[in-house]
Amino acid sequence: MEEYVVLLCSLVLVLLLYGAARVSYSIWWKPKWLERQLKRQGIRGTPYRPLIGDMKEFVRLIKEAWSKPMSLTHQIAPRVDPFTLTNMQKYGKISMYWVGTTPRLIITDTEMMKEILSNKQGHFNKPPLNPLILILTKGLASLEGEKWAKHRRIINPAFHLERLKEMIPVFAVSCGEMIEQWKRMVPLQGAWEMDIWPEIQKLSADVISRAAFGSTYEEGKRVFELQKELLVLTFEAMTTLYIPGFRCISIA
């Protein structure tokens, strides 16, 4: 009986050591090896942080950028994607950062971007997404291979130059209605201060409604509200560390 107990304990110990080795390999040794390989190729970037990678810094910079009004300039990168801009300024046009235990490249060199975007051999795959994002939304940005090609062919006609020119009168109607609404809000004498961001969002939604569906923003207001909620949930999923199986655990 004692021999069986010793054998069982030995097996458990071996399994624990094996599990620890696998975890150590995934969390530390493999990411550090990948980091060294990228550095040998001259690609610099943020240092590896176990498990979380650069997620905290990404969220911090986004919150910081969105916490203050945007300056009146066409330089929108500091507002839209401050993390990528900061990384590029610090490490160059081809740099790297970490999503969990996976390194990702940032490529802002125009010629290399053209080569990647025009490549039809399948050498360049999209980075893996948080599975929570795939539950919330499935679109062209997350598709690969034949599915991507099929959806791209479907939407291509909508972006032809001549088709876009036909939409100019629709754009003019939406802009005209917005300006008239603003005029009614301003008193005959005095000034009126307003938050322009929600108004621009409404204008964009109205243009899309008129150009694509022949309706107005007010008619499809509930749909746009739901899309906005979905966007918020998707952003939260992007900034959340995904642990496989965690969503199946119920906490009383």
Image (tube, grey):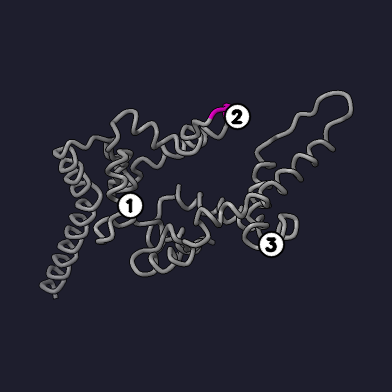
Residue drawn where x is 74% and y is 60% of the image: 219
For disc 3, the marked residue is: 214
Residue 201 in the figure: left or right of residue 91? right
Q: Residue at x 40, y 56 (%)?
A: 130
Answer with the quarter of the image where residue 68 lies: top right
Q: Quadrant of residue 185?
A: top right
Residue at the spot of label 2: 69
Quadrant assignment, res 33:
top left
| Residue sitting farthest toward the bottom | 1
Magenta stretch secondary structure, dominant: loop
Q: Nearer the viewer, residue 237 or 246?
A: 237
Instruction: Tell me the amino acid under the disc marked 3.
Output: Gly
Residue occupying image coordinates x 21% and y 55% = 20
Looking at the rendered structure, the kind of residue marked 1 is Leu
> Label 3's element?
loop
Q: Which residue is mark 1?
A: 117
Q: Which residues are magenta?
A: 68-73
Instruction: For label 3, count other residues whose C-alpha is less than 10 Å away and answer few (under 14), some (14-19) or many (20+).
Output: few
Q: Quadrant of the N terminus?
A: bottom left
* Residue 99, percent from left and from top: 34, 47
State the residue lying farthest toward the right.
Answer: 188
Query: What is the x, y in percent for residue 72?
Result: 58, 27
